[in-house]
Image (cartoon, helix red, strand yellow):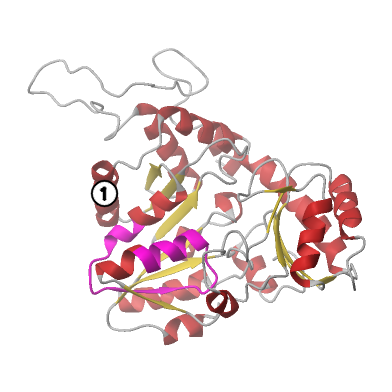
Amino acid sequence: MQFETLAIHDPHTPDPATGSVTVPIYQTSTFGREELGHRPEFFYSRIGNPTRQALETSLALLENARFGLAFASGAAATMAALQILKPGDHIVSGIDIYGGTYRIFEQLLRPWGITISYARDESTESYARCLTPETKLIWLESPSNPLLRLSDIRALAEISRETSIRVAVDNTFATPCFQRPLELGADIIVHSTTKYLGGHSDVIGGAIALNDPALHTIIKNYQAAAGAIPGPWDCWLVMRGIKTLKIRMKEHEAGALHLARMLESHPAVARVWYPGLPSHPQHDLARRQMSGFSGMITIALKGGLPAVEHLLHRTKLFTLADSLGGVESLAASPAKMTLGALSPEERDKRGCTDNLLRLSVGLEHPGDLEADLDQALEGIPV
């Protein structure tokens, strides 16, 4: 079946008990047992819940994975994926990653005795130069946050097969609608379901998809023991979002491409990063490993931070906010928000300058969004 059909017709609907065309919300902490010596499939909701199971099955279907696991947040999913490591292990990470992931690496993993190296750029050679005998995991975002850099997932997977190193891909920006990292050879996919999968800025969640039974056992055991799981209502909200994911992503992409072309020719804009533009450094790679380019744009303004503040003060349809992937358009300053906890030196290493503005293009009419950005850019020195 095609993607949009799988998103709507999962194995849990209609509900076999009632015929409900949506998965019921099993809002319960515990389940009755028939007898003392019998352990049913569901007995305590931290360990398993039918609504969460339905979400996990849907996530696996969309990523063409054997297993899906749901978590209380994208950060919780990241922590769960990292449980395949032990003290003394080494991670090679992309240089341009979400600030929350960087904090996990530096503030939580290093004290445990896990070391991290950051590739100088997104090239496969840059990752390869960082490998050591202790390397057990390559971690990347593609496209990355906030500079929308792409890494060659297939090439990195080939390296991993030669060295028994696992490859984990944060697929939040692309979603399974536009990219399937497992099919390119990756071992683990991580999502913040808060973003495009939920799609309505009304839920916090995370997810993992994978094929390897041994890795699944490690991560599922951590899920049950640590307990950072989403409640049934949150699971239901993500499933609701998944049903319209294909049509939303196509509209996000169409709006983003329209605005990226407009911004690329604007005199106040120094640079535009959008994988769908021929000017993007990895545009050819994007066309090979993605089926669409998503709804995220990052721009650099010629007027520096004052220009960013000017635009954010004037915009009417782009809301200044820390998230992305919802139906409404959002804007953020990576240097002051998502990567604000990093030192200026660390931000400089990553190319995160003060004049950057990250745009999450929503589902408003592209003409209205263009007009809003055009008037907000007025008055910026060029």
Front-most of residues 80 and 123: 80
Helix, strand or loop at disc 1? helix
Q: Tell me the amino acid under the disc marked 1.
A: Tyr
Front-most of residues 335 and 23: 335
Position of residue 76 in the picture relative to residue 354 (left or right)? left
User: Is 90 one of the magenta-colored residues?
Assistant: yes
Return the residue at label 1: 222
Position of residue 231 in the picture relative to residue 244 (left or right)? left
Res. 186 in view? no
Residue 364 in the image, given as x and y percentages of width and height: 79, 41
The correct choice, above or below, for 46 with respect to 342 in the image is above
**Residue with the most extreme top position:** 18
Front-most of residues 213 and 199: 199
Q: Residue at (15%, 27%) from the top-left corner? A: 39
Q: The N terminus appears in which quarter of the rendering?
A: top right
Image quadrant assignment for residue 121 = bottom right
Q: What is the magenta range?
A: 81-107
Position of residue 284 in the picture relative to residue 307 (left or right)? left
Q: The C terminus appears in which quarter of the rendering?
A: bottom right
Q: Residue at (55%, 79%) from the top-left corner? A: 345
The correct choice, above or below, for 185 with respect to 368 in the image is below
Q: Residue at (62%, 62%) from the top-left corner? A: 336
Residue 153 in the image, given as x and y percentages of width and height: 50, 69
The correct choice, above or below, for 284 with respect to 40 in the image is below
